[in-house]
Each structure stands twice: as C-alpha cells, then as structure tokens.
Amino acid sequence: MATATRKTATKKKAGSKSASAKGKTLLIVESPSKAKVIGKYLGSKYKVIASVGHVRDLPKSRLGVSVENNFEPEYINIRGKGDTIKEIKKEAAAADKVLLATDPDREGEAISWHLAHLLDLKPEDECRIMFNEINKQTVQAAIKEPRAIDEKLVDAQQARRVLDRLVGYQISPLLWKKVARGLSAGRVQSAALKLICDRETEIQNFIPEEYWYIAADFGDEFIAELSKIDGKKAEIKSEDETNAIKADLDKGRYEVADIKEGKRQTKPYAPFTTSSLQQDASIKLGFQTSKTMQIAQQLYEGISLKGIGARGLITYLRTDSVRVSDQARAAANEYLKETFGPEYAGNNYYANKNKAMQDAHEAIRPSDVTLEPEKIKDSLTPDQFKLYDLIWRRFVASQMTAAQYDTLAVLIENGKYEFKATGSRMTFDGWRKVYKTSSGDNEVNIPKLTEGEVLELEKLITEQKFTQPPARYTEAALVKEMEEKNIGRPSTYASIISVLVNRRYIKRVKKTLEPTKLGFDVIGILAAYFSDIVDVAFTGEMEDNLDGIELGNKEWKSVIADFYKGFAEELKVADEEVERIEREVVLSDEVCEKCGKPMAIKEGRFGQFLACTGYPECKNTKPIVKSTGVACPKCGKDIIEKRGRKSGKVFYGCSGYPACDVSYWDKPVGRFCPDCGSMLVQGKGKTKLIKCSNQECGYKEKKQGEDND
C-alpha cells in the first residue's frame, strides 16, 4: 500500500536524518494528551506528536477572503504556532513516513489538509488515518488502512469558514459604528439569537387566559379528571361555569361506564449523539454545553486508569449518528446476558433519519462496555465520572429489551359529564433497570372496578388556573430547537451559546437564557437589513447546501457566490440607512481622578466597569469595587471581589494590592480556622461549604444536622 510522499525538497531533508530515526513513522494528532495515550500503543518505530489544533487559518487582522478572486481563502500560519510548526517539520524531515491522524470529522480533515500543505505532502497520497475510539486495537488497525485526504470534507469545512468570515467580518464593523465597539454578528449565532429574542417577545406579549380544572376524588388516591361534556372536550372558562357543573354533578351519580385493560411497552432510547448528550447532560447533570463537550473530549482522548493504564473511554464525541458497530452490539449483548440475564439482552439496531448524510461515525458510546463506571470511579474526576456514567448507562440501556406495563383506562359517567382515569403497573423493567428518566417510572394504581359500579365521591376538586406563557429556553431546549430547525451543527452549539453570552446578547438567569437590551438592539438591525442571516428557514437551507458540499453534490465556491450576491447588496443598504443607536449612559457616584469628569457604568467582557465620560480625550477606566466586608488578616484593608485579567474568573484579594498580596479563590467569611488559624472561606458549590483556605489543613465545618463526631 502506498504511503505519504513528500516533494523533492523535503525528501532531501529526510536524507540527512540520523541513524536512530531511520525507518520511523511520524504520526500527527491534534492534542498532546491524545499523543501521549497513542504513543503508548505503538512501538519504537513510531513518533507521535500533536499539532495542538489548527496550524493555519484566515488572518485575524483582515477579511482574508479574496472576493474578487472567486472567494479564495488567504491562509497564514497561526501566530504563536511557529515553534510547533518548526518541530513538526523537523520530525517529518527525519521520518520515512508521515501519517495524519487528526480528529475524524470535517474540522480534523481540514487540519490534516493544512498539515499536508506545510509538509509538502500530496493530499491524494494515502497519508490520512482515522479512528473513532482510542484503544490499542483500533489505533493499530487504523495505521494499516491509510487513505487519501477527503477533499469533499475539506471543501465543506472551507465553505463554512469562508461563509462565517464574510458574514462576521463585514456585519460586525457596521454594529461597531451603529451600536457599540466589540460587537459581532455570526451567521449561525444570529439565527440562534433571533430564536431567543422571539421567545422573549412571545413571553412579553402573552395574555393569560382563565380556565378551570375539575376532578373527582374517590379516595385512596383514585382521582378521575373531567374530560368531556356532551361528548366534546371539556373547556371551562369561568367560576360561574364551574359552579353550574358542580351543581349538576351533585344531582347525579358516578357510574363506571367502561374499563379497558391492556399492555404497553416502552422501547429504550437510541445511544447518544452530540446533541442528545448535550441535552441530557444539561437536564440530568446541570452541565452547560461547553462543559459537556470539554469533559467528553477528555474521556475520548484518554484517561490514566489505575491498574489498567491510559485509554480512551468513549468513542468520538462529535457525531450526528445513532449507529452502533456490530462489534459493540455483540459486546453489549454478551455483557447484558452475563450481568442481568438473557431476558435483558435486546440486540437493538438504530438507524439515522437522514439517510443522505454520511455515516462515518458511530453514536457516542463507551469504548469498552465492561468498564463499568463504578469500577473506574477512583481514576476519574467527579464530573468525568458523572458524564461517563451517563454515556455508559445510555448505551447499555439502548441495547436492552423494552420495559413492559399492564395498563388500565376507566371511563366514569355522571349524566352528560365524562371522567377519565388511567393507570399502569410495570411488570418488567427492561432498559429502565439501568437508565432512569423523568417520566414513565411513576405508577398510577386504580382499584379493582366493574362496569356499572356506582362510585362514592369523596370530594370534587375544582381549581382556577391560567394559561402560561412559553418558557424561556434552557440550554437543553435551545440545543433541541437548533437541531430541529437545522441551525448550525451539534459540534458548534456550545460555542454559539458561549459567544452569545460573552457578547452580552443574552444572560443566564436561573438556568434559562434571557436576551439583553443589547441583544434586542442587535437583532433589530439584523432582522431589518439582513433578513436571510436571521431567518431560521434560510439558515437551515444553507446548512443543507453545506452538507451537499460534503456529499459531493455541490461546489463550495458556487454556494458562497450564490449567497454573497444578495448579502453584498444588503450590506450597502444597511451602511447607508441604519441609524446609530445611542446607548444609555448610567452615571456612577464616582469622579475621574485624572480629569474630574463623572465616571459612567459600562459593560465589558467580564461584566461592569467604570469609564470616564470624557472619552476619547480621557480613557481612564477602573473596576467597580465590590467589598466582601471582611478585613485583610495581613494589613486590615478591605478584601474585595476581583476578576483575573485574562481568565475573567472571580477571586478575592486585598484592596491594598500590590503592597499587600493576600488573595483567595473562594469568598472569605471573616472567621478563622480553629485548627490552623487561616481564613475560612465559603465554597462555590451548591452546598456553600465553609472550609479552611489553607489546602494543607483540610478543615471543613459540618452542615447543620450532621454528626460532629
């Protein structure tokens, strides 16, 4: 089988390699942690290094796309990657073969394509290898099956990159001029922002309507709800109607009109895709989408397990597929038979709804189903364990048999009024043995009844209710909506939400996403002048076109050209017509110490700060001081809340800095540790645990009700 070859100049370099490097194969992956794990699976004839993500990209300082030259991208080496590129070239020159093993998706394919360019490899040569999971067997098998770089995947990635650059780099300056500096408008993020703003408008315009609930309580938790009046759905709008119905019911009697016994089953969910994992982790674990992807990446790249060694725990985390390989299904089937019994082994197949999409990847599943979460818990962080446990249970459940139920539906009549009660009892737990859901596990018991039986009413339940406005999006709900409306791709959902939050277009409020006034201002301009950019249907159609490039059905520059015709005209009109939105100036009580003018409260990347109203003549800014009310144990000055300049993370430090360098990651409480005398602090977790700031001490205060022994 052919291997990667380099052009003449590179071959000459390779000819000067040392004797120790002779015969070696260079394997390039994306991340150092993955390189470390894979390096342990291969012998001394392999050298595994990391590109640490992309090595070439469009320049940050300019558009970087030649519109006049048929939208040709103008790639440059990424600033700060010089040493990495130099090392990669050095190792490639000293190797006999180079294999590119970047991630198995369009982004990874593009990184391999750029690496091939830097190393003078021919994309048509068989220099590309892929593996969906990281274990010794899979990696060694992949090395034996190199292929050419898939130019269709590369074109699909280039199309997205160029399209996003054209939109972002040409609308953003308009927003700077008309709204405020530092804003941005991305192709997909704008459509997502429109969803959030539209939902908020629905909530604001919602007018609640009154309705009434009526149910008959027959005791022993047996309750039947009023469902029909004169054969039509019961819709009760007022208290007067309710009282009239109550009077009618008091005159009649409650008689069992029909009993239907049956059976039903609930089938297990398919294993996780990227989107369903993000949704479930948000609902069950409270993880933000970005956190889910970060931890899943760690599980995929490899964890050092006690007594086992380093290995990847899950398959590739960016996938739209629910397919499971035959080997994985067989392994799960064997595990289920041995662990729970043959009656639990379902041997289930799952297929993707969209048959046109390429199916290169499996669903997200554990690489080894026998690695039960509890067995490796000691090797994982608490969050890694939670996510691995969720993935493992979802996959195992997906291969189990259905849960079985006995069902009962009872119809009770009182004159023209029909009451209905339904109940179910689980007779076989099936997949629910390992995977719990928020619905379906609750049983509703109905006593043994016979048709014609007259029931004794214990009380009639009447309750006034009002229709509720639609709920704000949670991260899980937004991810689901974006997937259903074909906005973006699951691998980008986390970054889209993060950008909207960081740009202050939306804010998180009690686990929901609420648009800010700035978000409404921006979407107002975009909706008025760039209707396609924020139109959900158009965005979904564009995603289909981009997928068509990946499938080889469309030429990427033609897709860009078709879009750009209308977009360029919209840009011109918007620049001429959009009026500047004057931002409200909120003055503080402070005066600028440099020029004496009032200081205004401004919004920045990491929250509010003070800025001189004399800008641009005076550019003085300073943070808004939030005192903790705690005196510094070293100098006696206030301990105040601060944020890291680069990270934006909150910490607490002495207001006397730099003369005094006392600081804490957690909020000090003003009391001292009885064991070592250090400051006690309040943890950031749900429990707000009071603990010693000295990590070597380990003192923690007992929660109320805990045993103090």
Image: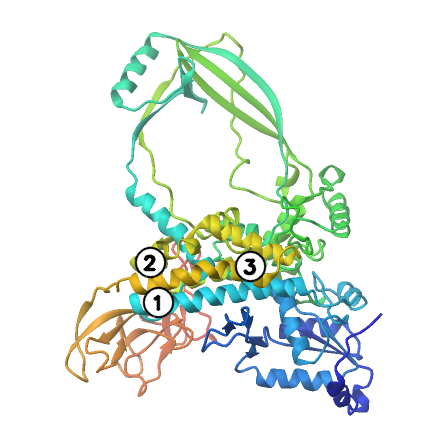
**Any mark on residue 343, and which?**
none
Q: Which residue in the protein does label 2 denote?
A: 525
Question: In which quadrant will I find the N terminus?
Answer: bottom right
Task: Decide if residue 2 is in sight here.
Answer: yes
Task: Please state which amino acid type lies under the numbered disc 3.
Answer: Val
Q: Is residue 69 above or below residue 366?
A: below
**Can you give x and y, in whole percent of width and height, for residue 478 in the image?**
46, 50
**Can you give x and y, in whole percent of width and height, for residue 180 in the image?**
30, 68
State which tag comes first along the sequence, 2 or 1: 1
Q: Distance between the Cα atoms at labels 2 and 1? A: 10 Å
Q: Are marks 2 and 1 in contact (CB under 8 Å)?
A: yes
State which tag comes first along the sequence, 2 or 3: 2
Q: Which residue in the protein does label 3 denote?
A: 559
Q: Which residue in the protein does label 1 denote?
A: 174
- Of residue 426 and residue 669, the one placed in the foreground of this image is 426
- Of residue 664 and residue 356, the one placed in the foreground of this image is 356
State which tag comes first along the sequence, 3 or 1: 1
Task: Please state which amino acid type lies under the numbered disc 1.
Answer: Leu
Q: Distance between the Cα atoms at labels 3 and 1? A: 24 Å
Q: Secondary structure at mark 3?
A: helix
Crowding near the residue tagged with mark 1, few <14, some 14–19, many ≥20 C-alpha atoms within 10 Å: many
Q: Nearer the viewer, mark 2 or mark 3?
A: 3
Q: Distance between the Cα atoms at labels 2 and 3? A: 25 Å
Q: Nearer the viewer, mark 3 or mark 1?
A: 3
